[in-house]
């Protein structure tokens, strides 16, 4: 068999459904022979970044390994930004690129470059197949490394002549891998002891909690301790229901503010994440002075990587947290249980106060036009069906989206990691492919949407019934907020305008752009128009775009 057959057989053996890509000449060995593999569907994008974003979100939404096929050096270069986001999101992916004939290696061929070196900084493993005999082992190892915790993308360069070489080495699925390590019983008891000794414990969860299906176990532990549950400011999943009384929301973006948010907390339990993705530097650690720090992870790599710990445990998140919750409940005295109940009641009261405050805020803003972000999010939250999946890149509207929408748990919500914009529209493609029986609504800022606007064409080409909501304030509002913070932090007194942060002159015509890519759309300015437009879009069974005029920064 040929090298290309081994690569394609490897995809089938590992349960791959979709090949995401933007093809070129050196990709011919794969794209020209896909017809012989009816279980593989090619998802065509007009830009390599869109292919990566779609595959990354597909991997997160489906639990399967995403597979991408890019075109040599410029194509890989176009994809690097989105590949960085996939790395930060821990998306299990295999990214390939066709490479020029290795016999041209010393002649500086057109489009030639060291692809392995280009990809290496943003993947877990980067390799080039030098002979067809290597293809089977490389693909097997690529799938393994991509899925080993913490998961992430792997890059494989596939020279065109290697793909056409003969080999006797056949593809192999690699077998079943049971990766979640068992939790040490002594460690479980030790962490339970520390948790019960705390007077004001808090829990911070990362995206691995959702991926591991550990949300219920975390909620059980939080209830047993009377502990708040915090999320990082940038998170891709929702592991715990939005209305859970112990769920406090997102932490701030610098160490000092995180520590202040914890308040009188005397113990912080970190579960399933790198912790913390700060944006601004501040002195000290994100923990209150004297607070104990515990951590539970699925890999040694993350344990105590960024901060010294009082105690740490490596184990499968769902069973480990369940064991600790059980140990806490068994060890708890009557006084411990009473204190936990009191703290839970306080958290419930705090959540009710915040809901009341948000309703009052909406009442004050309801007549303002263009619509404030809070009003637009509240209208959308009321109008979407119960089984909707939200793909979010709302940026400055994200806090209001969080307050307005109810997410039951994993699978209801997806967002980008790493901070690079443009992930939302591209990611919605992968989420819809992973959830063909659920409505998908993508909510994106207008600046973010422009980074991957060609995702609309892919949605139309493959008839993916996604509703794209574009929040149009005609500015990079998040950057204006960050300029304010920058000026404040560095003592810069200025009344200057925000340089280069307005998206006007000319105005962006999203309805017109969508029409040019085969997607019908409309612009709305009133809440009632938004409700009607959303209902019609969902009922259409086709991709639709709604351009929503929202209030700019004052």
Image: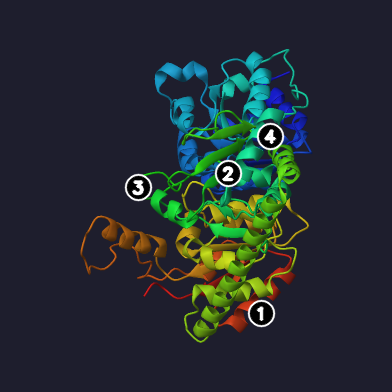
At which x and y percent is residue 342?
A: 65, 61
361 or 436: which is nearer to us? 361
The residue under label 1 is 532
Residue at 66% x, 18% y: name it.
Answer: 137
Judge left or right: residue 169 versus residue 483. Answer: right
Q: Which is nearer the N-term, disc 2 or disc 4?
A: 4
Quadrant location of the C terminus in the rendered image: bottom left
Please give the name of the residue rendered at 54% of the width and 33% of the height, measured from the top-left corner: 302
Instruction: Tell me the tag on residue 175.
Output: none
Mark toward the start of the polypeptide (4 vs 3): 4
Badge 4 element = helix
Say which of marks 4 and 1 sits in front.
4
Q: Note whether residue 411 is visible.
A: no
Q: Which of disc 3 and disc 1 is earlier in sequence?
A: 3
In front: label 2 or label 1: 2
Residue at 74% from the left image edge and 31% from the top image edge:
14
Q: Which residue is mark 3?
A: 281
Q: Quadrant of the N terminus?
A: top right
Residue pointed to by mark 2: 269
Which of the 4 image quadrants contains residue 32? top right
Residue toward you, 333 or 221: 333
Q: Residues within 10 Å of mark 4 (few under 14, many from 20)?
A: some
Q: Is residue 532 left or right of residue 422?
A: right
C-alpha separation, residue under disc 4 versus residue under disc 1: 55 Å
Q: Which residue is mark 4?
A: 189
Q: CA distance from mark 2 to mark 1?
A: 45 Å
> x, y (%) of residue 476?
40, 63
């Amino acid at each position: 068999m040929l090298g290309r057959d081994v690569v394609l057989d490897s995809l089938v053996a590992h349960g791959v459904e979709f090949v995401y890509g933007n093809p070129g000449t050196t990709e011919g060995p794969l794209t020209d022979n896909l017809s012989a593999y009816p279980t593989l569907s090619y998802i065509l994008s007009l830009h390599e970044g869109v292919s990566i974003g779609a595959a990354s979100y597909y991997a997160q939404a489906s639990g399967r390994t995403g597979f991408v096929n890019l075109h040599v050096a410029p194509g890989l270069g176009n994809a690097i930004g989105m590949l960085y986001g996939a790395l930060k999101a821990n998306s299990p992916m295999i990214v390939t690129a066709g490479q020029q004939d290795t016999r041209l290696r010393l002649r500086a061929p057109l489009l030639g470059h060291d692809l392995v070196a280009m990809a290496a900084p943003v993947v877990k493993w980067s390799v080039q197949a030098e002979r067809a005999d290597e293809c089977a082992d490389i693909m097997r190892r690529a799938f393994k490394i991509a899925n080993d915790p913490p998961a992430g993308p792997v890059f494989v360069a596939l020279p065109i002549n290697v793909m056409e070489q003969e080999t006797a080495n056949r593809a192999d699925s690699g077998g079943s891998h049971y990766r979640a390590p068992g939790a040490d019983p002594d460690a479980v008891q030790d962490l339970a002891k520390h948790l019960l000794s705390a007077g004001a414990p808090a829990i911070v969860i990362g995206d691995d909690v959702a991926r591991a299906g550990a949300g219920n176990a975390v909620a059980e532990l939080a209830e047993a301790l009377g502990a708040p549950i915090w999320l990082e400011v940038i998170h891709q999943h929702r592991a715990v229901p939005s209305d859970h009384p112990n769920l406090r929301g997102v932490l701030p973006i610098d160490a000092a503010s995180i520590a202040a948010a914890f308040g009188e907390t005397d113990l912080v339990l970190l579960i399933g994440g790198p912790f913390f993705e700060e944006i601004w530097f501040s002195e000290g650690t994100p923990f209150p002075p004297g607070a104990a720090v515990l951590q539970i992870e699925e890999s040694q790599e993350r344990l105590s990587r960024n901060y010294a710990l009082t105690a740490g445990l490596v184990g499968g998140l769902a069973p480990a947290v369940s064991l600790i919750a059980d140990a806490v409940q068994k060890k708890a005295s009557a006084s411990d249980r009473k204190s936990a109940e009191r703290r839970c009641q306080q958290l419930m009261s705090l959540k009710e106060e915040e809901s009341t405050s948000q309703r009052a805020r909406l009442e004050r803003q309801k007549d303002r036009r263009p619509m404030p972000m809070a009003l637009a999010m509240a209208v959308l939250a009321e109008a979407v069906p119960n089984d909707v999946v939200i793909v979010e890149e709302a940026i400055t509207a994200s806090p209001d989206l969080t307050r307005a929408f109810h997410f039951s748990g994993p699978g209801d919500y997806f967002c980008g990691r790493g901070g690079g914009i443009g992930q939302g529209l591209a990611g919605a493609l992968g989420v819809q492919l992973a959830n063909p029986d659920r409505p998908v609504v993508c909510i994106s800022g207008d600046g973010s949407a422009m980074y991957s606007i060609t995702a609309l064409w892919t949605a139309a080409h493959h008839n993916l019934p996604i509703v794209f909501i574009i929040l149009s304030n005609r500015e990079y509002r998040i950057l204006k907020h960050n300029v304010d913070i920058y000026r404040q932090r560095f003592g810069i007194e200025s009344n200057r305008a925000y340089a280069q942060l307005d998206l006007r002159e000319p105005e962006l015509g999203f309805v017109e752009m969508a029409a040019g890519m085969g997607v019908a759309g409309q612009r709305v300015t009133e809440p009632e128009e938004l409700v009607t437009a959303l209902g019609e879009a969902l009922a259409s069974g086709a991709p639709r775009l709604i351009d929503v005029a929202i209030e700019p920064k004052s």
